[in-house]
Image (cartoon, grey):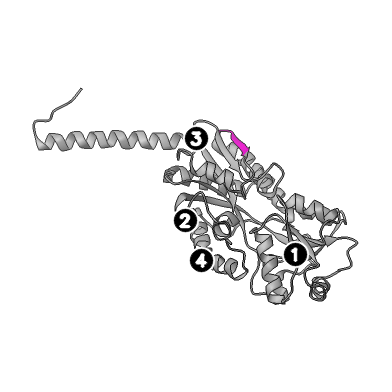
Amino acid sequence: MVLWMRSSKGLFLMAGILGMVLFTQEGFAQEAYPRKPIQMAVQTSPGGTIDTLTRAICRVAEKELGQAIVIENKPGGANLIAVNYVLRSKPDGYTLGTTASLVLLNAPHTMDKMPFNVLSDFVDIMPFFKYTFGICVKADAPWNSFEDFIAYARKNPGKVTYGNPGIGSTSHITMERIAMKEGIKWTPIPFKSDDESVLNCLGGHTDAVSSSSLAMSGHIKEGKLKLLLVLNDSRWPEFPNVPAIPEKGFDFYAISYGSFYGPKGLPEPIRQKMEEVVIKSMRDPSYLEVLNRYQMGIPPFKSGKEYSDFWRSKYDEMGKVIKTLGLGPK
């Protein structure tokens, strides 16, 4: 039915009433979110670092949201299959994902072609853990310190092999930056995951491994691996005698965060609600216990916007580092 107004005053009145109705309906829809389970795409196979931490925080977040969060593992494609899936989904808040900073900072500079634009297609929700990385060797390896390891690599150019979770990963790039500064050459051996790179070191297929603490810490505690150096800006609490990379005179360190994100067009009220839920969930004792178990940390950011501003400010800088290392597209 069409209503005709006989005066301009009546027209403005009707427009105002319609606006109030639409505003009320929109507000109601946003308050009701989520009204059904949320699909959470994870870029790795079950058991990986980001999968483990995603599941841990989602168990807490479900209670806050009153809805299930269904984890969907979509590994492969240099971690891009899951991300592309989320970014191409309807921006209604029911298909979200978790990813690592390397997808935002490293992949665009190492790959020939990206299926999306990280600077325009991502909506950052909130980071929920800080990655920690290290260099390990087998317990029976002849090197008992980082200095021993570097000295051997310097005397044997190209002979030392180290496993990593993929070309362009944070672990790989940090190791190559070390090699460049030390004037040495070693051979990176990429694997499909942190766990695979660690297992191959334990099996004697590589001399060392540069990986995340989640994949290595259990083996260190069991005496199967020796931690030679922490690649972050500070020591790991559970292994306080092992130095961090800044203590060895390097002016860089590995930095990466796991974060929640959504596709372009995600309504701000939904993004804001998820941000608040993630922040609250990070304080939960059960989640903190998982972080502590694997030497992971809480991100220093107070909001998704602060995190977004951070990684975007590092984008060009990382591109220059990768180009200098010769790791860009051939």
- Disc number for residue 316: 4
Residue 135 position in % (x across, y down): 76, 63
Q: Identify whether 103 is placed above or below 6.
A: below
Q: Quadrant of the N terminus?
A: top left
The disc, 4 or 3, on the residue closer to the chain's N-terminal end is 3
Question: Quick check: 109 left or right of 272?
Answer: right
Looking at the image, how many numbered discs can be counted on the residues? 4
Q: Are marks 2 and 1 in contact (CB under 8 Å)?
A: no
Name the residue that disc number 2 marks. 119
The kind of secondary structure the magenta stretch mainly shows is: strand
Q: Which residues are magenta?
A: 67-72
Q: Identify whether 184 is placed above or below 303.
A: below
The disc, 3 or 2, on the residue closer to the chain's N-terminal end is 3
Residue at 58% across, 43% down: 82
In the displayed orientation, state which residue is furthest to the front.
Answer: 330
- Disc number for residue 187: 1
Considering the numbered disc 2 on the image, is that residue within a helix, a strand or a loop? helix
Which amino acid lies under the numbered mark 3 shown in the image of this protein?
Pro
In front of the other: 184 or 222: 184
Rounded to the nearest angstrom, the CA distance separating label 1 from label 3 is 48 Å
Rounded to the nearest angstrom, the CA distance separating label 4 from label 3 is 36 Å
Query: Is residue 294 visible from the viewing direction of this image?
Result: no
